[in-house]
Image: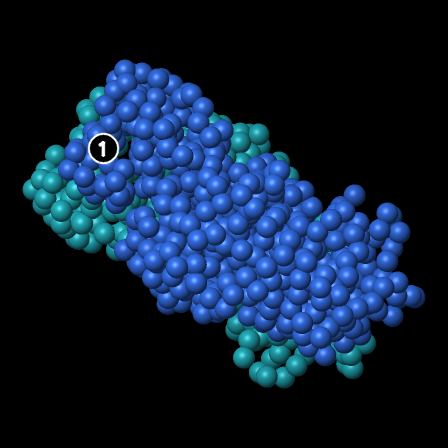
Chain colours: A blue, B cyan
C-alpha cells in the first residue's frame, strides 16, 4: 500500500502528544542546522528523527562542504576567491538555469557560513590536496570538487578550490568520515541549546488549520500515532526521493535502479506531504552522479562514449563526468589507457583504490582494442589519432584538457567498460525561497512550513559540485530555523 | 502579479452562474474529444474556452495523429503493424521510462481510435509519403513521423509509418492544415450531440467541496467572475505550460525562451489549479523539439555537434534530431553538405522550403571549412574522413544511417550554423491514469477531476514522435469524457 501523506485538519486532532515552537522533521545536516538557529532565535525546538540516531545521509558522506568567496581556509592556503567569482562558476556549472537568486545569496553568505560552522566546532585542516580524486586521501581540508580548474570552467571563473572537508581526528571513523565530523558538532551545539530530539518517530502528515497554516505534524512511533504541535513552524528536512521508485520513474527515470550516496529513508516523504497541500517542486529531473572509476586513471586516459567519441575533458570533476555520461551519453562510457598511463596512475595516491581493478579488455593495437570493445569500426582509431596528434603538441583542441595530462597514448592498451557504471541521488525537490519558506505553484509561501536539504531544490539545477548538498543543506537549514522561529 | 489558481471552497460560492453534468476547460483536441464522449455517455456538457473560438493549438498543427497497430489506412497502403510492434517502438523511442501502462493501452486501442475519428468525420487520404520531411508536402495521409524506419528503432520494431494526416480538401486552409481538419469534425460532432460552449471564459480556480471533491470551477469573462457547477466532473484540457516562463525555468530550463508549435494560452493554468489541491505531475522536464532545418537536407548531410562529432543518424525523424541536439548537445549543431548533396536536396520535394536558405559557410576543403566554422582543429576532418570511408562501402558503422543516403562528401562544401536553432513545447504535466483521472502524489485520484492533452503527461516521457500529442490528447480526452460522465 502506498503511503498516503494526506494532510490532517487541525480540528480533527483530539490531543497533542508533544509540542514545541519549532518542529523539525529529520536530523541530518539540514535539520541540525535548522535546530541550532531556531534555538538561538529563542524558540523551543523539537527534532523528530525516523531512525534511531541523528546524522542522516550526511554522516555517511565524505564531508565536502562547498564554501568559497574567500574563506579563511582558502586564504590561508593561498587561494583568491570572491562571492562574484564563486557565483560565476556556480551559475555555469550547476545549471542549466540554476536558481540565480539562491546562488548569489549562497555565495554572498559563504564566508559567514564558514565562520558559523567553525563557531559550532567544525574544524578544517590547513592542507590542500592538489590531485584528482573523489575525496582527499586523508583529512586534507581543501580540494577542487567541481571542475573549477578544468575546461570549460577555468576560463569562466578564476579557479579556486571550494571543497572544504572537516578534519577527522587523524583517521576515518569507521565508515564515518568528514560528514560525521561535520554533523556531530552541529548536533552537540543544538544539544547545548536545549534542543530536544525524539527518535524512531516518522513524520507522516502535516496538520493544517482552517486558514491553511501548518500547525503541526502527525507521526508514528512503533506503530502508534503521535500528534505534534508546532506553535511557530514546521521544518521539513528528511532528504531526497531517490529511494522512492515511483517518484524516480516519474521525475528522474535515468536514475531508476541506481540510487547511491543516500540512505533508504530518502523516500520523498517531505515532498509528498508538502505536495498534498499544494506545494510546488522544481528541477525534479536533476541528479547528482558518481561513476565507478578512479579520477587519477580518468585524467591519464581517454574517455569515449558508445560511438567511440570523446565528450568531456577527462581531468575535470569526476562527478561531472558521471552526470554527462548518465544524462547525455545514455550511460555508455569506456576508459582507454596505455600501459605507461596505467602504471603512472597506479603509482599515484587515491582515496578510491577499490576502483583500480584490472582493465576489461587489453590489446596491442587500437584496432584490435576497438574490435574487442565492440565499438563502431574506425571510431576509436580516429579518436585516438586525433587525441595523440594534439597531445604531441600539448594541446587538446576538442575539449581543453590540461597539458599536464596530455601525452600520446602508445600500445599496449587497456580499456575499462564503464557502461551502466553510474549511480547517484536526486537533486530536485520542494521549491523554496531564500528564507526556506515552502512555496506554492502561485509563488506564495505555505504559512508555517519551511524546508531545507535534499528534499528541496537548492543551488543545483542540472549540474553538481561535491559539497553542494552539505553546503546548501546547512546554509538553508539555518535559514529555515531562523524563519520558523519567528513568533 | 502572478495568477493565484488557489481552489475555492464550495461553501463560499454564493450563486452558480452556469451548470452542466460535465464541465470541460479548453476546446482544443482533448476538450473536443472529451465533450463528444461525455455527451454520448448521456451527460450534459459545457465547454469553457478562453479564446474566441474552438481549436486551440491543435488547429494550428500539421495534423499528425500517431496511430497504428494495423489501422485500415496502414493496411490499405500495404504496411503491417500490430499493437505489440507499435508498443515496442513507442517504449524505445518515447522514453527514458515512458509510461508503459499508458503506451500498451494506447496501442491496444489505436485501431478503434482510428475508427472513432473516422466515425466523427475525419478523413484520411490513401496515399503514403515516403520521403523525409516535417510534414507531407500535400495532403498525403500517411508518413513516417518518429524515426520508425531509421536506426536504432528499425532494429527494435518492424518499421511502420504511423503519422496519420487528415485530408485537407485538396489545399491547406490558410495557416490551418491537417489540425483544423481533425478538430472541426470533432467539434461538429459535439455540437450535434448538444454540447454547448462558452467562449472568452477563462477558468481560474477549481471549486472543491468539504469532502475534497471537485464540484465546479470559477472562471472570468470580461473581468467578471462566473461560478460554474459541474454535477459529475470537471475535465482540464487547456494545454501545455510552455508559455509560462517561471514554470519552464523550474522544470524544463533548456526550453526557456524558445516556445514553438504552441499558443500563448499554454500557460500551465490547468497544472497549477490542480497542483493547488494536491495533484501530482510527471516528466515535467520533457520537451518536444523542432530544429530549423529541412529534413531532405539533413538526410543528405553530416550533422555534427560543437565538438565536430556526429551524434544522431541524419536520416531519422527530425524531431529526434532536434531533441537530442537540445537535450544532449547543449543546442550546438552544424550541418555539412557538399555541392552534389545540396543540389540533390534542393531538387527534392519538401513541406518546408523556407528552411532552404544559403549555407552559413562555404569552403573548398574540409580544413578550411572547419576553421571558418570555429570547430576544434582536426575534429571535422576526422569525422568526415571516417564518414566518407564508411559511405564508400555503403556503411555507417557509427550510427547506422541508411545506405540510401550514404555517399562520400567531396568538395566544395557548405555548412549551416544550427546552434540555438531548436524550439518546442513541454510534454510534462498532470499525472493521470488510464481513465484520465488526475492523481495525487499518493496515487489516489482527486474525486471529480479529469485531464487530458498537453496539460498531462501522456505517452511521451523524454522522446517524441509527431502525432503523439494530437494522438494522446484525443485518445485520453475521450477517456476523460467517458469517466467524467459517470453519474
Coordinates of residue B480 in the picture (x, y in percent): 67, 54
Coordinates of residue A366 in the picture (x, y in percent): 27, 21
User: Does residue B247 appear anywhere in the picture?
Assistant: no
Residue A106 versus residue B166: which sits nearer the camera?
A106
- Quarter in which the N terminus of chain B is drawn: bottom right
At 71% from the left and 64% from the top, the residue drawn is A192
At 39% from the left and 54% from the top, the residue drawn is A161
**Circle 1 sits on which residue?**
A407
Chain label for disc 1: A
* Side (left or right) of B204 relative to B178: right
* Residue extending furthest toward the left: B364
Coordinates of residue B451 in the picture (x, y in percent): 64, 57
* Side (left or right) of B241 relative to B475: left
User: Does residue A223 appear anywhere in the picture?
Assistant: yes
Coordinates of residue B387 in the picture (x, y in percent): 22, 31
Residue A190 versus residue B474: which sits nearer the camera?
A190
> Helix, strand or loop at disc 1?
loop
Residue A132 versus residue A258: which sits nearer the camera?
A132
Amino acid at each position: 500500500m502506498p503511503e498516503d501523506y494526506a494532510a490532517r485538519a487541525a480540528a480533527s486532532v483530539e490531543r497533542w502528544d508533544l509540542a514545541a515552537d519549532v518542529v523539525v522533521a529529520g536530523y541530518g545536516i539540514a535539520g541540525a542546522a535548522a535546530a541550532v538557529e531556531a534555538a538561538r532565535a529563542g524558540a523551543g525546538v523539537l527534532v523528530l528523527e525516523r531512525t534511531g540516531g541523528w546524522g542522516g545521509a550526511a554522516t555517511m558522506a565524505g564531508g565536502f562542504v562547498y564554501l568559497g568567496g574567500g574563506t579563511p581556509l582558502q586564504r590561508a592556503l593561498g587561494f583568491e576567491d570572491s562571492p562574484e567569482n564563486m557565483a560565476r562558476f556556480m551559475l555555469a556549472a550547476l545549471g542549466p538555469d540554476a536558481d540565480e537568486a539562491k546562488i548569489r545569496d549562497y555565495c554572498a553568505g559563504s564566508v559567514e557560513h564558514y565562520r558559523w560552522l567553525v563557531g559550532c566546532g567544525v574544524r578544517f585542516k590547513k592542507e590542500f590536496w592538489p590531485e584528482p580524486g573523489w575525496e582527499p586521501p586523508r583529512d586534507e581540508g581543501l580540494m577542487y570538487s567541481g571542475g573549477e580548474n578544468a575546461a570549460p570552467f577555468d576560463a569562466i571563473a578564476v579557479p579556486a578550490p571550494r571543497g572544504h572537508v572537516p578534519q577527522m581526528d587523524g583517521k576515518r571513523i569507521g565508515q564515518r568520515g568528514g560528514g560525521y565530523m561535520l554533523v556531530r558538532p552541529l548536533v552537540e551545539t543544538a544539544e547545548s541549546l536545549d534542543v530536544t530530539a525524539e527518535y524512531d518517530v516518522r513524520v507522516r502528515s502535516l496538520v493544517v488549520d482552517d486558514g491553511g497554516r501548518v500547525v503541526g505534524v502527525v507521526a508514528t512511533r512503533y506503530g502508534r500515532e503521535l500528534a505534534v504541535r508546532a506553535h511557530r513552524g514546521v521544518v521539513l528536512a528528511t532528504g531526497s526521493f531517490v529511494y522512492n521508485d515511483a517518484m524516480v520513474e516519474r521525475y528522474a527515470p535515468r536514475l531508476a535502479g541506481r540510487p547511491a550516496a543516500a540512505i533508504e529513508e530518502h523516500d520523498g516523504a517531505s515532498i509528498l506531504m508538502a505536495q498534498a497541500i499544494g506545494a510546488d517542486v522544481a528541477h525534479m529531473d536533476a541528479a547528482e552522479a558518481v561513476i565507478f572509476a578512479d579520477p587519477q586513471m580518468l585524467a591519464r586516459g581517454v574517455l569515449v562514449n558508445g560511438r567511440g567519441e570523446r565528450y568531456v575533458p577527462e581531468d575535470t570533476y569526476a562527478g561531472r563526468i558521471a552526470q554527462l555520461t548518465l544524462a547525455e551519453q545514455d550511460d555508455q562510457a569506456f576508459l582507454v589507457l596505455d600501459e605507461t598511463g596505467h602504471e603512472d596512475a597506479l603509482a599515484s595516491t587515491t582515496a578510491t583504490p577499490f576502483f583500480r581493478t584490472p582493465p576489461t579488455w587489453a590489446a596491442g593495437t587500437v584496432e584490435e582494442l576497438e574490435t574487442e570493445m565492440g565499438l563502431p569500426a574506425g571510431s576509436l582509431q580516429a579518436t585516438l589519432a586525433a587525441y595523440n596528434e594534439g597531445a604531441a603538441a600539448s594541446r587538446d583542441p576538442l575539449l581543453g584538457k590540461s597539458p599536464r595530462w596530455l601525452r600520446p597514448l602508445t600500445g599496449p592498451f587497456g580499456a575499462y567498460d564503464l557502461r551502466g557504471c553510474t549511480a547517484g541521488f536526486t537533486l530536485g525537490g520542494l521549491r523554496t525561497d531564500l528564507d526556506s519558506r515552502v512555496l506554492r505553484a502561485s509563488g506564495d509561501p505555505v504559512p508555517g512550513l519551511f524546508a531545507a536539504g535534499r528534499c528541496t531544490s537548492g543551488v543545483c539545477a542540472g549540474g553538481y559540485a561535491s559539497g553542494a548538498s552539505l553546503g546548501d543543506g546547512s546554509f538553508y537549514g539555518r535559514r529555515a530555523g531562523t524563519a520558523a522561529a519567528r513568533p
